[in-house]
């Protein structure tokens, strides 16, 4: 009898399968939060941790229960699944990493439960957290007809007001945008879907159109379907159009830029038809956070690079997304807001005044190619050092010109007489720049001699003046390589051997680079 | 001749006064007291920045001159417009008010909000109208209520309600950074906004002692304590000084 009673009690006490209690333990969640999250999000969840002041976008303030990435209607609370996605996958394009591989399932679910305690809305039973029902994408989404429909709605519902004509975040309203905490906020660059906070798939884009991104200027367009301004299918077409602006797959970072040899002379113009036939390479840039004054909010997230040579000259085409043709007075207030928002490391000193700084780009080489067979000694990647300078090509948007010189660290740049020829076009949110120079120059001591078949180290730096970038406040890359491919020899029998040798040589380079990676990690 | 004119003028003034007196609305059916007053403005009237609507020709065409920001609107008679005046406290705990059936309309016309400051009751419909036919998004930066941010790229009306009292909810359009308005959500109908003559009226108050608050987006808040009994009318004037 007693046994039966105990058994009944046990059954009653057993948690139902639906109970989330065993997986969501706010005490444990707090421990995880304090250890991993509070540094950015703050002890009270107000998004004001010690690191927050250096970030743009700022860490989420949990106290309002307001979230960008949701499957719920505008202004509604997110579902647990929405929050878990952000924790698991992180928020691309921001400082928030994915925690799936770093925290256990139980830890992530517990911290989720703890985060919800920061806002009383989650305890408010009158809040109905209901995910929207989403349809599936209609087929043919990459076809010209579908994209044309999508583009029509891109124009008619005013996406271009913020995101710009070509979707690079340079619309007329872009310089006035702020989030709910009055921090400056960029309209997304729709050409970089791998940096979309909620994911870059067409389904993700469609969901953001339906739900909006709460706390930001991005509204929900769901009412338009209810009011029959557009159909669900047309909203999908818009999402498919937006998706089509980015590459089919996120750009893969490859170490070597191949410059094929072309007949005739290299193109000097960035809009020469030659460039359409040359492979392009993506190099990510990060904020310069090693030397004062550090910069944690780089505006240029990467550069696309193409190169060709004609046996005598090299042409290097660098293109990058930039919302402004700096200096642009329309963005001066925005620039000031960035400078006020993103704390530098000059503690105590007031934020610098916005100035109409120009845009800049630098391409860096060693002065001489590394000696010896396979030797890869290179100067310090961050503009060399006092005794070990680097050779740089620099380009500036105003007065628009290119020049060359030796950098001895960030602070010191000495111009050399010989300059590369530079031609640049600014077109609706994109800079396209071609720099050309003779492969061989008289000043062999200071100017890198560009030899075919050699691995030529190069690196990139970019400044967006209208984001307050100048001097050490810039975006930087690590060392990569440029390879000038040899002309196809007349004897076709030699080619396979040559290809093997080149592959082997570059393979060696890559292997050595990989071995060195440990040393370079701190900047990536 | 001059004398006749003076008599006529006096007559006209008297007639106007009489008309104004007779136009006093009768007390509401349920009776109750009235609190009315004026919101004065002292000091130098600030110059409001001009709004550049070049990007929106449709809106720009709706103005004779260059429109200015509406943060501070000082009337010709030296009073302050767009001051929200409401019963902050003093209603009996048992007091309940059901939301009126009709909506309150907020119109986006000429890339500005009309009205610039408005009140609504909990549960009452806010009809958000786009008369411009160009893209506006309307974002309600509510804190006590859930916020929203919806897109209106064409002539259309969207309806929203609010569950909880909240003074104030900031409304803004992010496409047009100058567009902002203020919405108060109250659990009762005792509120008003100072108009073009700086006056306001709160009607139908049950007998009691009330804290009346006057709120202005730039000059902050002021309060007055007023006791009303029966169907009497009490005066509560406010004065905001230039900053």
Image (spheres, grey):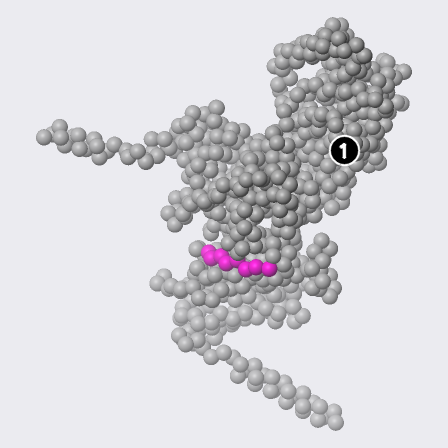
Q: Main secondary structure of the magenta part?
A: strand
Q: Is residue A391 above or below residue B19?
A: above
- Element assignment for label 1: strand
Q: Is residue A336 magenta?
A: no
- Place of residue A159 in the rendered image (x, y in percent of width and height, measured from the top left): 63, 47
What residue appears at the point 80 percent right and 19 percent down from the top-left corner?
A261
Q: Is residue B23 above or below residue B189?
A: below
What residue appears at the point 57 percent right and 39 percent down from the top-left corner?
A140
Query: What is the quadrant of residue A167 in the picture?
Result: top right
What residue appears at the point 65 percent right and 71 percent down from the top-left corner?
B77
Q: Is residue B157 magenta?
A: yes
The answer to whether residue B233 is seen in the rendering is yes
Q: Is residue B224 above or below residue A439?
A: below
* The N terminus of chain B sits in image quarter: bottom right
- Name the residue carrying label 1: A432
What residue appears at the point 68 percent right and 29 percent down from the top-left corner?
A302
Looking at the rendering, the stretch of residues picked out in magenta corresponds to: B155-162
* Nearest to the observer: residue A24 or residue B186: A24
- Place of residue B138 in the rendered image (x, y in percent of width and height, measured from the top left): 57, 53
- Place of residue A421 in the rendered image (x, y in percent of width and height, measured from the top left): 85, 27
* The C terminus of chain B sits in image quarter: bottom right
The answer to whether residue B138 is seen in the rendering is no
The chain under label 1 reads A
* Nearest to the observer: residue B1 or residue B147: B147
Q: Is residue B140 left or right of residue A192?
A: left
């Amino acid at each position: 009898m007693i046994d039966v009673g105990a058994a009944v009690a046990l059954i009653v006490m057993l948690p139902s399968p639906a109970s989330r209690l065993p997986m969501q333990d706010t005490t444990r969640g707090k421990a995880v939060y304090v250890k991993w999250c509070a540094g950015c999000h703050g002890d009270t969840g107000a998004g004001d941790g010690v690191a927050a002041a250096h970030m743009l976008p700022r860490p989420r303030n949990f106290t309002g229960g307001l979230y960008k990435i949701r499957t719920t209607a505008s202004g509604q609370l997110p579902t647990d699944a929405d929050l878990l996605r952000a924790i698991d996958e992180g928020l691309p394009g921001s400082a928030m990493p994915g925690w799936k591989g770093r925290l256990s399932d139980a830890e992530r679910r517990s911290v989720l439960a703890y985060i919800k305690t920061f806002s009383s809305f989650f305890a408010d039973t009158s809040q109905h957290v209901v995910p929207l029902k989403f349809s599936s994408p209609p087929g043919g989404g990459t076809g010209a007809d579908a994209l044309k429909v999508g583009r029509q709605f891109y124009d008619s519902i005013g996406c271009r007001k913020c995101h710009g004509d070509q979707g690079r975040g340079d619309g007329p309203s872009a310089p006035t945008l702020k989030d709910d905490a009055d921090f400056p906020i960029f309209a997304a660059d729709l050409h970089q879907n791998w940096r979309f906070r909620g994911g870059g798939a067409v389904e993700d884009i469609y969901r953001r159109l339906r739900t909006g991104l709460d706390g930001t200027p991005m509204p929900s367009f769901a009412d338009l379907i209810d009011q029959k301004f557009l159909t669900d299918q047309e909203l999908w077409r818009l999402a498919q159009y937006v998706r089509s602006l980015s590459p089919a797959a996120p750009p893969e970072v490859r170490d070597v830029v191949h410059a094929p040899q072309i007949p005739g002379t290299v193109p000097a113009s960035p809009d020469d038809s030659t460039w359409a036939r040359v492979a392009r390479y993506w190099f990510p840039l990060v904020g310069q956070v090693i030397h004062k004054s550090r910069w944690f909010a780089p505006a240029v997230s990467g550069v696309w690079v193409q190169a060709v040579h004609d046996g005598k000259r090299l042409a290097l085409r660098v293109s990058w997304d930039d919302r402004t043709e700096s200096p642009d007075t329309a963005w001066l207030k925005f620039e000031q807001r960035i400078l006020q928002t993103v704390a530098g490391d000059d503690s105590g000193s007031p934020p610098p005044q916005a100035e109409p700084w120009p845009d800049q780009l630098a391409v860096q080489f060693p002065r001489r190619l590394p000696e010896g067979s396979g030797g890869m000694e290179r100067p310090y990647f961050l503009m060399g050092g006092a005794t070990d300078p680097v050779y740089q090509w620099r380009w500036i948007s105003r007065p628009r010109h290119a020049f060359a010189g030796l950098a001895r660290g960030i602070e010191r740049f000495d111009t050399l007489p010989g300059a590369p020829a530079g031609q640049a076009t600014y077109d609706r949110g994109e800079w396209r720049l071609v720099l050309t120079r003779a492969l061989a120059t008289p000043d062999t001591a200071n100017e890198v001699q560009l030899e075919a078949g050699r691995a030529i180290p190069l690196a990139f730096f970019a400044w967006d003046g209208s984001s307050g970038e100048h001097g050490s406040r810039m975006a930087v890359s690590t060392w990569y390589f440029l390879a000038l491919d040899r002309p196809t020899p007349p004897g076709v029998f030699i080619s396979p051997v040559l290809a093997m040798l080149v592959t082997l040589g570059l393979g060696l380079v890559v292997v050595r680079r990989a071995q060195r990676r440990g040393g370079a990690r701190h900047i990536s | 001749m001059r004398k006749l004119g003076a008599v006529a003028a006096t007559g006209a003034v008297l007639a106007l006064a009489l008309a104004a007196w007779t136009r006093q609305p009768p007390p509401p059916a349920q009776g109750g007291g009235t609190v009315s007053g004026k919101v004065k403005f002292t000091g130098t009237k600030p110059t409001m920045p001009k709004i550049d609507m070049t990007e929106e020709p449709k809106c720009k065409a709706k103005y004779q001159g260059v429109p200015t920001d509406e943060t501070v609107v000082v009337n010709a008679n030296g009073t302050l417009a767009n001051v929200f005046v409401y019963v902050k406290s003093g209603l009996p705990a048992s007091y309940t008010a059901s939301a009126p059936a009709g909506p309150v309309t907020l119109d986006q016309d000429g890339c500005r909000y009309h009205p610039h400051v408005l009140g609504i009751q909990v549960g009452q419909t806010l009809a958000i109208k786009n008369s411009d036919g160009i893209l506006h998004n309307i974002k309600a930066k509510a804190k006590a209520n859930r916020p929203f941010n919806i897109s209106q790229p064409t002539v259309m009306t969207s309806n929203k309600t609010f569950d909880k009292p909240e003074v104030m909810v900031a409304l803004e359009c992010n496409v047009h950074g100058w567009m902002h308005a203020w919405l108060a959500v109250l659990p009762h109908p005792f509120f008003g906004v100072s108009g073009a003559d700086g006056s306001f009226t709160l009607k139908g108050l049950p007998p009691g002692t009330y804290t009346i608050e006057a709120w202005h987006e730039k000059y902050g808040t002021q309060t007055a304590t007023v006791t009303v009994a029966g169907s009497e009318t009490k005066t509560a004037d406010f004065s905001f000084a230039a900053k």
